[in-house]
Amino acid sequence: MMEKHAKIYVAGHRGMVGSAIMRELERQGYTNIITRTHKELDLCRQTEVEQFFAEEKPEYVFLAAAKVGGIAANESALADFMYDNIILEMNVINSAWKNGCKKLEFLGSSCIYPRMAPQPIKESYLLTSELEKTNEAYALAKISGLKYCEYLNRQYGTDYISVMPTNLYGPNDNYHPEHSHVLPALIRRFHEAKLANAPSVTCWGDGTPLREFLYVDDLANLCVFLMNHYSGNEIVNAGTGKELTIKALTELVAKIIGYKGAIKWDTTRPNGTPRKLLDVSQATALGWTYKTELEDGIKLAYQDFLNNPMRAER
Protein backbone atom coordinates (compact mmCIF):
# COMPACT_ATOMS: atom_id res chain seq x y z
CA MET A 1 0.00 0.00 0.00
CA MET A 2 1.21 3.50 -0.80
CA GLU A 3 1.60 5.55 2.37
CA LYS A 4 -0.31 8.87 2.29
CA HIS A 5 2.94 10.85 2.59
CA ALA A 6 4.94 8.71 0.11
CA LYS A 7 6.63 10.61 -2.71
CA ILE A 8 4.61 9.92 -5.87
CA TYR A 9 5.62 11.09 -9.35
CA VAL A 10 2.87 11.43 -11.97
CA ALA A 11 4.46 11.62 -15.44
CA GLY A 12 2.15 13.36 -17.91
CA HIS A 13 0.12 15.15 -15.22
CA ARG A 14 -1.35 17.67 -17.67
CA GLY A 15 -2.85 15.05 -19.99
CA MET A 16 -6.32 13.58 -19.68
CA VAL A 17 -5.15 10.44 -17.82
CA GLY A 18 -2.41 12.08 -15.76
CA SER A 19 -4.67 14.91 -14.56
CA ALA A 20 -7.34 12.36 -13.58
CA ILE A 21 -4.74 10.38 -11.57
CA MET A 22 -3.76 13.65 -9.85
CA ARG A 23 -7.41 14.30 -8.91
CA GLU A 24 -7.82 10.76 -7.58
CA LEU A 25 -4.63 10.84 -5.51
CA GLU A 26 -5.62 14.17 -3.98
CA ARG A 27 -9.16 12.88 -3.33
CA GLN A 28 -7.70 9.90 -1.45
CA GLY A 29 -5.47 12.12 0.69
CA TYR A 30 -2.03 11.64 -0.86
CA THR A 31 -0.02 14.73 0.01
CA ASN A 32 3.42 14.36 -1.57
CA ILE A 33 2.82 14.33 -5.34
CA ILE A 34 5.56 15.64 -7.62
CA THR A 35 5.17 16.74 -11.23
CA ARG A 36 7.18 18.37 -13.99
CA THR A 37 5.89 20.13 -17.09
CA HIS A 38 7.39 19.24 -20.47
CA LYS A 39 9.35 22.53 -20.35
CA GLU A 40 10.82 21.63 -16.96
CA LEU A 41 11.65 18.04 -17.91
CA ASP A 42 11.80 16.55 -21.40
CA LEU A 43 11.22 12.82 -20.83
CA CYS A 44 12.83 12.04 -24.20
CA ARG A 45 16.18 13.34 -22.88
CA GLN A 46 17.92 10.56 -21.00
CA THR A 47 20.32 12.76 -19.01
CA GLU A 48 17.48 15.04 -17.87
CA VAL A 49 15.38 12.07 -16.72
CA GLU A 50 18.33 10.43 -14.94
CA GLN A 51 19.13 13.68 -13.13
CA PHE A 52 15.49 14.17 -12.09
CA PHE A 53 15.20 10.66 -10.61
CA ALA A 54 18.60 10.88 -8.89
CA GLU A 55 17.57 14.16 -7.21
CA GLU A 56 13.91 13.41 -6.40
CA LYS A 57 13.97 9.62 -5.86
CA PRO A 58 10.18 9.11 -6.11
CA GLU A 59 8.92 5.99 -4.32
CA TYR A 60 6.00 5.45 -6.70
CA VAL A 61 5.60 6.36 -10.37
CA PHE A 62 2.49 6.58 -12.54
CA LEU A 63 3.71 6.66 -16.15
CA ALA A 64 0.86 8.39 -17.99
CA ALA A 65 3.02 10.48 -20.36
CA ALA A 66 2.89 9.61 -24.07
CA LYS A 67 2.79 11.11 -27.53
CA VAL A 68 -0.78 10.39 -28.63
CA GLY A 69 -3.19 11.08 -31.48
CA GLY A 70 -6.01 9.69 -33.60
CA ILE A 71 -5.80 7.66 -36.81
CA ALA A 72 -4.69 10.60 -39.00
CA ALA A 73 -1.90 11.63 -36.62
CA ASN A 74 -0.72 8.04 -36.17
CA GLU A 75 -0.58 7.35 -39.89
CA SER A 76 1.23 10.55 -40.84
CA ALA A 77 3.93 10.39 -38.14
CA LEU A 78 4.75 6.70 -37.70
CA ALA A 79 8.46 7.19 -37.01
CA ASP A 80 7.86 10.04 -34.53
CA PHE A 81 5.25 8.06 -32.59
CA MET A 82 7.54 5.07 -32.29
CA TYR A 83 10.70 6.96 -31.36
CA ASP A 84 9.21 9.43 -28.88
CA ASN A 85 7.16 6.84 -27.03
CA ILE A 86 9.86 4.18 -26.78
CA ILE A 87 12.54 6.66 -25.67
CA LEU A 88 10.22 8.31 -23.13
CA GLU A 89 9.13 4.98 -21.59
CA MET A 90 12.61 3.48 -21.45
CA ASN A 91 14.06 6.61 -19.84
CA VAL A 92 11.41 6.78 -17.10
CA ILE A 93 11.20 3.04 -16.34
CA ASN A 94 14.97 2.55 -16.36
CA SER A 95 15.65 5.59 -14.17
CA ALA A 96 12.91 4.52 -11.74
CA TRP A 97 14.56 1.10 -11.43
CA LYS A 98 18.08 2.56 -11.03
CA ASN A 99 16.89 4.87 -8.26
CA GLY A 100 15.07 2.28 -6.18
CA CYS A 101 11.46 3.17 -7.04
CA LYS A 102 9.21 0.84 -4.98
CA LYS A 103 6.52 0.46 -7.61
CA LEU A 104 5.78 1.78 -11.09
CA GLU A 105 2.54 1.63 -13.06
CA PHE A 106 2.70 1.82 -16.83
CA LEU A 107 -0.33 3.06 -18.78
CA GLY A 108 -0.78 1.36 -22.13
CA SER A 109 -3.64 1.30 -24.61
CA SER A 110 -6.05 -1.30 -25.96
CA CYS A 111 -4.52 -0.77 -29.44
CA ILE A 112 -1.70 -3.13 -28.35
CA TYR A 113 -3.98 -6.10 -29.02
CA PRO A 114 -4.11 -7.97 -32.34
CA ARG A 115 -6.36 -6.44 -35.01
CA MET A 116 -8.50 -9.56 -35.25
CA ALA A 117 -8.36 -10.62 -31.59
CA PRO A 118 -11.32 -12.72 -30.39
CA GLN A 119 -13.91 -10.67 -28.45
CA PRO A 120 -14.02 -9.73 -25.65
CA ILE A 121 -10.23 -9.30 -25.58
CA LYS A 122 -8.40 -11.10 -22.79
CA GLU A 123 -5.00 -9.92 -21.57
CA SER A 124 -3.50 -13.23 -22.76
CA TYR A 125 -4.28 -12.37 -26.43
CA LEU A 126 -1.33 -9.95 -26.55
CA LEU A 127 1.14 -10.82 -29.36
CA THR A 128 -0.92 -13.75 -30.67
CA SER A 129 -1.39 -12.24 -34.17
CA GLU A 130 -0.70 -9.10 -36.20
CA LEU A 131 -1.50 -5.53 -35.12
CA GLU A 132 -3.77 -2.94 -36.73
CA LYS A 133 -1.52 -1.24 -39.33
CA THR A 134 -2.83 2.31 -38.74
CA ASN A 135 -1.46 2.47 -35.19
CA GLU A 136 1.20 -0.23 -35.34
CA ALA A 137 4.03 2.17 -34.44
CA TYR A 138 2.27 3.38 -31.28
CA ALA A 139 1.24 -0.17 -30.33
CA LEU A 140 4.80 -1.48 -30.72
CA ALA A 141 6.09 1.31 -28.49
CA LYS A 142 3.48 0.53 -25.81
CA ILE A 143 4.20 -3.22 -26.01
CA SER A 144 7.91 -2.45 -25.54
CA GLY A 145 7.14 -0.46 -22.39
CA LEU A 146 4.95 -3.10 -20.77
CA LYS A 147 7.40 -5.86 -21.71
CA TYR A 148 10.31 -3.89 -20.21
CA CYS A 149 8.34 -3.68 -16.94
CA GLU A 150 7.76 -7.44 -17.06
CA TYR A 151 11.43 -8.17 -17.84
CA LEU A 152 12.64 -5.97 -14.96
CA ASN A 153 10.29 -7.87 -12.65
CA ARG A 154 11.68 -11.17 -13.88
CA GLN A 155 15.34 -10.21 -13.90
CA TYR A 156 15.57 -7.88 -10.92
CA GLY A 157 12.48 -8.61 -8.81
CA THR A 158 10.90 -5.17 -9.27
CA ASP A 159 7.18 -4.58 -8.69
CA TYR A 160 6.20 -2.85 -11.96
CA ILE A 161 2.67 -3.27 -13.32
CA SER A 162 0.84 -2.33 -16.53
CA VAL A 163 -2.76 -1.22 -17.19
CA MET A 164 -4.47 -1.28 -20.61
CA PRO A 165 -7.43 1.11 -20.87
CA THR A 166 -10.20 0.95 -23.44
CA ASN A 167 -11.40 4.16 -25.18
CA LEU A 168 -11.26 6.99 -22.63
CA TYR A 169 -13.14 10.28 -22.37
CA GLY A 170 -13.74 13.01 -19.82
CA PRO A 171 -12.16 16.20 -18.45
CA ASN A 172 -9.06 17.49 -20.30
CA ASP A 173 -9.89 15.55 -23.46
CA ASN A 174 -8.65 16.76 -26.85
CA TYR A 175 -11.41 18.25 -29.03
CA HIS A 176 -9.23 19.12 -32.03
CA PRO A 177 -11.21 18.82 -35.31
CA GLU A 178 -8.68 16.44 -36.95
CA HIS A 179 -6.69 14.92 -34.11
CA SER A 180 -9.36 13.92 -31.60
CA HIS A 181 -10.89 10.52 -30.89
CA VAL A 182 -14.47 9.60 -31.74
CA LEU A 183 -16.34 10.72 -28.59
CA PRO A 184 -14.77 14.19 -28.16
CA ALA A 185 -15.04 14.67 -31.94
CA LEU A 186 -18.80 13.97 -31.77
CA ILE A 187 -19.25 16.33 -28.80
CA ARG A 188 -17.60 19.14 -30.74
CA ARG A 189 -19.40 18.39 -34.00
CA PHE A 190 -22.90 18.25 -32.49
CA HIS A 191 -22.24 21.32 -30.34
CA GLU A 192 -21.17 23.33 -33.41
CA ALA A 193 -24.12 21.97 -35.44
CA LYS A 194 -26.51 23.03 -32.68
CA LEU A 195 -25.05 26.56 -32.57
CA ALA A 196 -25.25 26.85 -36.36
CA ASN A 197 -28.76 25.36 -36.57
CA ALA A 198 -27.37 22.90 -39.12
CA PRO A 199 -30.11 20.72 -40.64
CA SER A 200 -27.93 17.59 -40.47
CA VAL A 201 -24.62 16.15 -39.25
CA THR A 202 -22.71 13.60 -41.34
CA CYS A 203 -20.68 10.93 -39.55
CA TRP A 204 -18.10 8.52 -40.95
CA GLY A 205 -18.94 4.94 -41.92
CA ASP A 206 -22.31 3.26 -41.40
CA GLY A 207 -22.58 3.42 -37.60
CA THR A 208 -22.36 -0.35 -37.06
CA PRO A 209 -18.95 -0.71 -35.29
CA LEU A 210 -19.15 -1.48 -31.59
CA ARG A 211 -17.09 0.49 -29.07
CA GLU A 212 -16.52 0.56 -25.31
CA PHE A 213 -15.90 3.77 -23.36
CA LEU A 214 -14.49 4.36 -19.87
CA TYR A 215 -14.77 7.67 -18.01
CA VAL A 216 -11.23 8.82 -17.25
CA ASP A 217 -11.84 9.39 -13.52
CA ASP A 218 -12.94 5.75 -13.25
CA LEU A 219 -9.64 4.72 -14.88
CA ALA A 220 -7.74 6.88 -12.37
CA ASN A 221 -9.60 5.18 -9.52
CA LEU A 222 -8.53 1.79 -10.91
CA CYS A 223 -4.93 2.98 -11.34
CA VAL A 224 -4.63 3.91 -7.66
CA PHE A 225 -6.49 0.72 -6.67
CA LEU A 226 -4.03 -1.45 -8.63
CA MET A 227 -1.03 0.39 -7.23
CA ASN A 228 -2.29 -0.60 -3.77
CA HIS A 229 -3.73 -4.06 -4.46
CA TYR A 230 -2.06 -5.70 -7.47
CA SER A 231 1.37 -7.09 -8.31
CA GLY A 232 2.23 -9.33 -11.24
CA ASN A 233 3.59 -9.62 -14.77
CA GLU A 234 0.13 -9.90 -16.33
CA ILE A 235 -1.26 -6.67 -17.75
CA VAL A 236 -4.69 -5.60 -16.45
CA ASN A 237 -7.46 -4.44 -18.79
CA ALA A 238 -9.39 -1.32 -17.81
CA GLY A 239 -12.92 -0.95 -19.15
CA THR A 240 -16.62 -1.33 -18.44
CA GLY A 241 -17.24 -4.62 -20.21
CA LYS A 242 -20.12 -2.87 -22.04
CA GLU A 243 -20.29 -1.74 -25.65
CA LEU A 244 -22.60 0.15 -27.99
CA THR A 245 -22.72 0.91 -31.71
CA ILE A 246 -21.28 4.15 -33.06
CA LYS A 247 -24.82 4.89 -34.29
CA ALA A 248 -26.21 4.59 -30.73
CA LEU A 249 -23.31 6.71 -29.46
CA THR A 250 -23.99 9.53 -31.93
CA GLU A 251 -27.69 9.53 -31.00
CA LEU A 252 -26.80 9.68 -27.30
CA VAL A 253 -24.37 12.59 -27.82
CA ALA A 254 -26.94 14.46 -29.95
CA LYS A 255 -29.57 13.98 -27.23
CA ILE A 256 -27.28 15.23 -24.43
CA ILE A 257 -26.18 18.28 -26.41
CA GLY A 258 -29.72 19.01 -27.54
CA TYR A 259 -29.14 18.75 -31.30
CA LYS A 260 -32.44 18.13 -33.09
CA GLY A 261 -31.30 17.78 -36.72
CA ALA A 262 -30.78 14.68 -38.83
CA ILE A 263 -27.80 12.31 -38.53
CA LYS A 264 -26.45 11.08 -41.86
CA TRP A 265 -23.79 8.49 -42.64
CA ASP A 266 -21.00 8.75 -45.22
CA THR A 267 -20.44 5.09 -46.12
CA THR A 268 -17.48 5.98 -48.39
CA ARG A 269 -15.57 6.68 -45.15
CA PRO A 270 -13.95 3.85 -43.18
CA ASN A 271 -15.64 2.15 -40.24
CA GLY A 272 -12.45 1.10 -38.49
CA THR A 273 -12.31 -2.12 -36.45
CA PRO A 274 -15.78 -3.74 -36.29
CA ARG A 275 -15.56 -4.44 -32.56
CA LYS A 276 -13.12 -3.75 -29.73
CA LEU A 277 -14.36 -4.88 -26.32
CA LEU A 278 -12.03 -5.66 -23.42
CA ASP A 279 -12.49 -8.60 -21.09
CA VAL A 280 -12.43 -6.92 -17.67
CA SER A 281 -12.86 -10.05 -15.55
CA GLN A 282 -9.37 -9.74 -14.06
CA ALA A 283 -10.03 -6.25 -12.62
CA THR A 284 -13.47 -7.47 -11.44
CA ALA A 285 -11.88 -10.47 -9.69
CA LEU A 286 -9.52 -8.08 -7.88
CA GLY A 287 -12.59 -6.26 -6.53
CA TRP A 288 -12.91 -3.24 -8.84
CA THR A 289 -15.76 -2.07 -11.10
CA TYR A 290 -16.39 1.17 -12.97
CA LYS A 291 -18.78 3.75 -11.47
CA THR A 292 -19.76 6.21 -14.22
CA GLU A 293 -22.42 5.20 -16.76
CA LEU A 294 -21.87 6.49 -20.29
CA GLU A 295 -24.74 8.99 -20.37
CA ASP A 296 -23.65 10.57 -17.07
CA GLY A 297 -20.04 10.62 -18.22
CA ILE A 298 -20.85 12.32 -21.53
CA LYS A 299 -22.82 15.01 -19.65
CA LEU A 300 -19.74 15.65 -17.48
CA ALA A 301 -17.47 15.67 -20.54
CA TYR A 302 -19.77 18.16 -22.32
CA GLN A 303 -19.66 20.47 -19.29
CA ASP A 304 -15.86 20.29 -19.39
CA PHE A 305 -15.92 21.11 -23.12
CA LEU A 306 -18.14 24.15 -22.47
CA ASN A 307 -16.01 25.35 -19.55
CA ASN A 308 -12.73 25.05 -21.43
CA PRO A 309 -13.03 26.98 -24.70
CA MET A 310 -9.28 26.81 -25.30
CA ARG A 311 -9.47 23.00 -25.38
CA ALA A 312 -11.56 23.17 -28.50
CA GLU A 313 -8.75 25.04 -30.31
CA ARG A 314 -5.98 22.55 -29.58
Image (cartoon, helix red, strand yellow):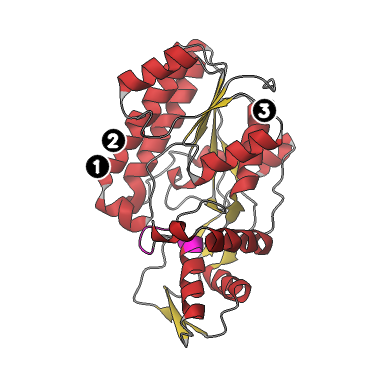
Please determine whether, in this image, residue 19 is positioned above or below residue 73: above
Return the residue found at the far bottom.
199
> Would you name the residue on which mark 2 appears?
83
Residue tagged 3: 30
Indicate which disc, 2 or 3, sits on the residue closer to the N terminus: 3
1 or 3: mark nearer the eye = 3
Question: Mark 1 and mark 3: span between their CA atoms?
Answer: 38 Å
Give the percent coordinates (x, y) of residue 245: 56, 68
Classify residue 103 as left or right of residue 11: right
Label 3, secondary structure: give it: loop
Crowd band around label 2 with a 10 angstrom C-alpha radius: few (<14), some (14–19), many (20+): some
Q: Nearer the viewer, residue 257 or 265?
A: 257
- Frontmost residue, 137 versus 11: 11
* Figure check: 253 above or below 273: below
Residue segment shown in magenta: 177-184
Any magenta on residue 186? no
| Residue 97 location (% of width, % of height) | 46, 15
Q: Report the mark closest to the observer, 2 or 3.
A: 3
Q: Amino acid at mark 3?
A: Tyr
Main secondary structure along the magenta-highlighted residues: loop
Q: Amino acid at mark 1?
A: Ala
> Are the residues flagged by discs 2 and 1 in contact, CB closer than 8 Å?
yes
Residue 51 occupies which quadrant of the picture?
A: top left
- Which quadrant is the N terminus positioned in? top right
Q: Is residue 173 above or below residue 6?
A: below
Kindly report the distance in space between the C-alpha atoms of the residues bearing marks 2 and 1: 6 Å
Q: Where is mark 1, residue-wise?
A: 79
Tell me which residue sits at (72%, 40%) in the image. Answer: 288
The kind of secondary structure element at disc 2 is helix
